[in-house]
Image: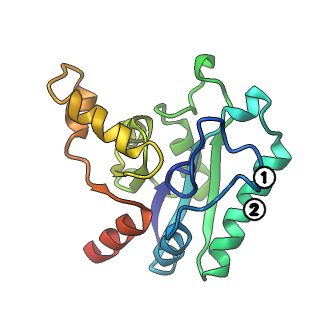
């Protein structure tokens, strides 16, 4: 099995600046469930790494978050795939935790729980934080235009002459319209 890591909001499901606060608000992006199932059936172990500060903000409780994740897993299983684990950071941005992306604590938790190195694994995200976490841990970042992806792409292009090395190094990141397109490219490259 080969590990593959996905961000959640904006990659798998529609994102919201007001946070996904209920199971009803969690709406998969067209093709994302199919993409996860296809990757899983092809031998990838799928892990999700997601910042969920809405938990600490009181926008939803742990039961709601677990119901959303159960729905995600169920939809993928209906398509013949499997999600090996969903890992989330509940902390606020200013708490200084080691798990909130762009920190790599979620990736370390995935490695510990699944017993497999994330170094060299594909990491599909829609935000600069996703790409930075992937790069910092030695993963292979891929950007999708869904969610915050188009905005992230604009930031990368606007900052390509920036002295910040994390931005200039990320300019070579492959970009896809959505997770389904990214999954097809990953499977073709295998």
Quadrant of res 28: bottom right
Circle 1: element type: helix
Left/right placement of residue 47 relative to residue 42 reads right
- Coloured how? rainbow
Left/right placement of residue 129 relative to residue 173 reads right
Circle 2: element type: helix
> How many numbered marks does the figure carry?
2
What residue sits 44% from the left and 41% below the top? Answer: 130
Q: Does residue 104 lie above or below 74 as drawn?
A: above
Left/right placement of residue 113 relative to residue 103 reads right
The answer to which of 90 and 176 lies nearer the viewer is 176
> Which residue corresponds to mark 2?
70
What residue sits 74% from the left and 55% below the top? Answer: 68
> Which residue corresponds to mark 1?
66
Mark 2: give few (<14), some (14-19) or many (20+) Cα within 10 Å: some
x then y, percent, for residue 12: 54, 58
Mark 1: give few (<14), some (14-19) or many (20+) Cα within 10 Å: few
Q: Does residue 34 lie above or below 157 as drawn?
A: below
x then y, percent, for residue 24: 76, 56
Left/right placement of residue 57 relative to residue 32 reads right
What residue sits 14% from the left and 25% below the top? Answer: 161
Q: Does residue 189 lie above or below 58 as drawn?
A: below
x then y, percent, for residue 142: 34, 52
x then y, percent, for residue 177: 35, 59
Placement of the C terminus among the 4 image quadrants: bottom left
Are the residues flagged by discs 1 and 2 in contact, CB closer than 8 Å?
A: yes
Real-space Cα separation, disc 1 to disc 2, in angstroms = 6 Å
Residue furthest to the left: 161
């Amino acid at each position: 099995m080969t590990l593959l890591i996905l961000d959640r909001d904006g990659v798998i499901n529609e994102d919201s600046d007001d946070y996904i606060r209920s199971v009803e608000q969690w709406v998969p992006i067209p093709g994302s469930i199919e993409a996860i199932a296809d990757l899983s059936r092809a031998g990838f172990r799928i892990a999700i790494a997601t910042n969920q500060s809405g938990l600490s903000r009181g926008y939803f409780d742990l039961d709601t978050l677990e119901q959303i994740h159960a729905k995600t897993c169920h939809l993928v299983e209906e398509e013949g795939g499997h999600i090996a684990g969903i890992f989330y950071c509940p902390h606020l941005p200013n708490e200084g935790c080691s798990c909130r992306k762009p920190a790599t604590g979620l990736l370390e938790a995935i490695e510990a729980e699944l017993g497999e190195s994330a170094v060299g694994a594909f990491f599909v995200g829609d935000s600069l934080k996703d790409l930075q976490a992937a790069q910092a841990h030695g993963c292979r970042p891929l950007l999708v235009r869904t969610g915050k992806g188009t905005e992230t792409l604009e930031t990368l292009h606007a900052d390509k002459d920036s002295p910040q090395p994390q931005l200039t190094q990320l300019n070579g990141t492959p970009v896809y319209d959505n997770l389904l397109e990214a999954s097809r490219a990953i499977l073709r490259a295998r």
